[in-house]
Amino acid sequence: MSYTSGYVPVEEATVLIDTSRMNQVLEINTEDMFVTVEVGCSWKKLHDSLKNTGLRTPFWGPLSGMHATVGGSISQSSVFFGAGLFGASADSVVSMQVVLANGDVLSTGSAAQKNGTPFFRHFGPDLTGVFTCDTGALGVKATITLRLMPEYKSMRHVSYDFDNYEAQIKALSEIARKNLAAQMFGTDPGLGQVRAQRDSLLNDVKALGGVLSASGSVLGAVKQGAKIALAGRRVVKNASYPIHANIEERCDAAADEVALQVEAICRRLGGKKIENSVPAIVRANPFNPLNNMVGPQGERWVPVHALLPHSKVLESVKMTEAIFEKYQAAIEKHNIITGFLFTTVSTNCFFMEPLWFWPDELNELHRATVEAGVLAKQKGFPANLEARAAVTAMRNELVQAFSEMGASHLQVGKEYIYKEGLKPESYALLAAIKQVVDPKRRLNPGCLGL
Ligand SMILES: Cc1cc2nc3c(=O)[nH]c(=O)nc-3n(C[C@H](O)[C@H](O)[C@H](O)COP(=O)(O)OP(=O)(O)OC[C@H]3O[C@@H](n4cnc5c(N)ncnc54)[C@H](O)[C@@H]3O)c2cc1C
């Protein structure tokens, strides 16, 4: 599900390893509080396996978790569910087993000790960290152990709308700095319109079922359900710069208090409370079919992203808008839609995702992933190389500009500027590690510039 060519070969005669049958949850250890999975296990399967245990992993999946695997997400890091409080996917890992190029199987964390088990990450220098976010350039992960923690069952879902992105971004940053939301996201009018067009009534009804079954009380469920049915579509269509947040706490009093704190921040910055149907639906149905991977009429979609300190977000959005402006003629000519998605990672990181939709033909991956019923109703488009080239040019300019701003990235793969952007001493150490674990450069050549 990644889109930065991480798994795309750059050499002839390449072997691709498909981990989809390595999909077992191997051990749920409720005494020592860890769970070990085979790398091809999806986040949805892990989530389902932990149901009824009262436990979860701190980070518990990207929005693509129906298909995205624990192995893929740890190999490049991912954000979303749980990331607001507990950081990215790599931050939840305790230990791994990694197959090196010569066939050695390396254990990391406390399991690196001869008599050890995978209960803790740090025993000497962080060998686990060396292999997270390597996009597979340093070894093939076979199993991954993640920390377990209790589920926070008291939830509140809140949405606020702002009339400009400056206030929206300030509110997201402030909520993040105060560590209030389990996960949250913001969209702009461009993305809001696209989502509103795509979501069918049927999806609403299906999603509503999830909200109802996830709701504690029958009365609460009915009230919530009725509100969503009436307001769901309208909320998405009318909202201009909304923030949707899930608050998850240990008890109702704490959840109410945190919701009040979020409200105070949003109101101070000019936010208006709107129906909370979007965050309620997202939280109740976390891992849906990935129909969002294409636009409402079967347009192509591609994002690019930057991980930024809060202080650089506004500058970065303005810079992105300037690039969109520069390409305005091409955007209009080819019916390209631009948009933004924002989220945050723990207290100290803002995730900004500019994205594009444009009329162009879908490929095999889209057809294998998007539900057939959804594809069948879409108009679809023939190949549109000119539009694709315009989007690629904008995306490349942004990648360059993000590097100049000192942004970090998830899924570095073969597209973000890594080698050229790193200080020489740092890159030299990484290259030296590669030389030890894969001296003949057999593993995923080209990733991380290695
Ligand atoms: C609709 C949609 C929504 C998305 N939502 C999110 C989101 O909410 N948050 C987010 O962060 N991302 C999101 N993504 C991006 C993507 O889904 C994530 O990056 C996800 O983590 C990719 O997982 P995967 O299993 O598909 O990895 P892949 O794309 O298969 O692989 C990713 C990289 O890891 C390497 N790799 C995979 N398995 C191993 C292994 N066992 N050992 C070593 N290297 C390995 C691959 O070579 C590749 O470089 C989304 C994508 C789509 C299409």
Image (spheres, rainbow, N blue to C red):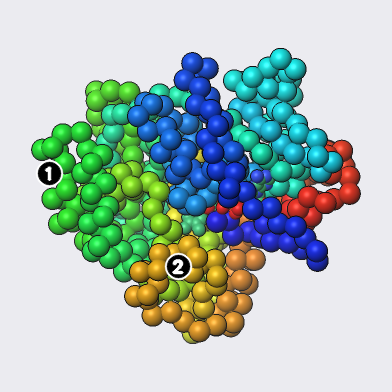
Q: Is residue 58 left or right of residue 74?
A: left
- Compared with 183, 281 (above or below) is below
Give the class, few, some or many, for how many residues have Cα within 10 Å of label 2's Cα (few <14, many ≥20).
many
- The image position of residue 5, as x and y in percent, is 66, 60
Residue 84 seen: no
**Disc assigned to residue 353:** none
Disc 1 secondary structure class = helix
Q: Which residue is mark 2?
A: 294
Q: Could you say where residue 2 lies in the image, as x and y percent from the top left?
A: 58, 56
Q: Secondary structure at mark 2?
A: loop
Is 194 on the left or on the right of 425, as rendered?
A: left
Tell me what residue is drawn at x 28 percent, y 33 percent: 155
Frontmost residue, 100 versus 418? 100
The quarter of the rendered structure image containing the N terminus is: bottom right
Question: x, y (%) of residue 22?
Answer: 59, 44
Q: CA distance from mark 2 to mark 1?
A: 33 Å
On the image, numbered disc 1 is attached to which residue?
223
The residue shown at (21%, 61%) is 234
What residue appears at the point 72 percent right and 36 percent down from the top-left corner? 98
Relative depth, front residue between 259 and 62:
62
Tag 1: residue type? Lys
Amino acid type, mark 2: Val
- Residue 125 picture quarter: top right
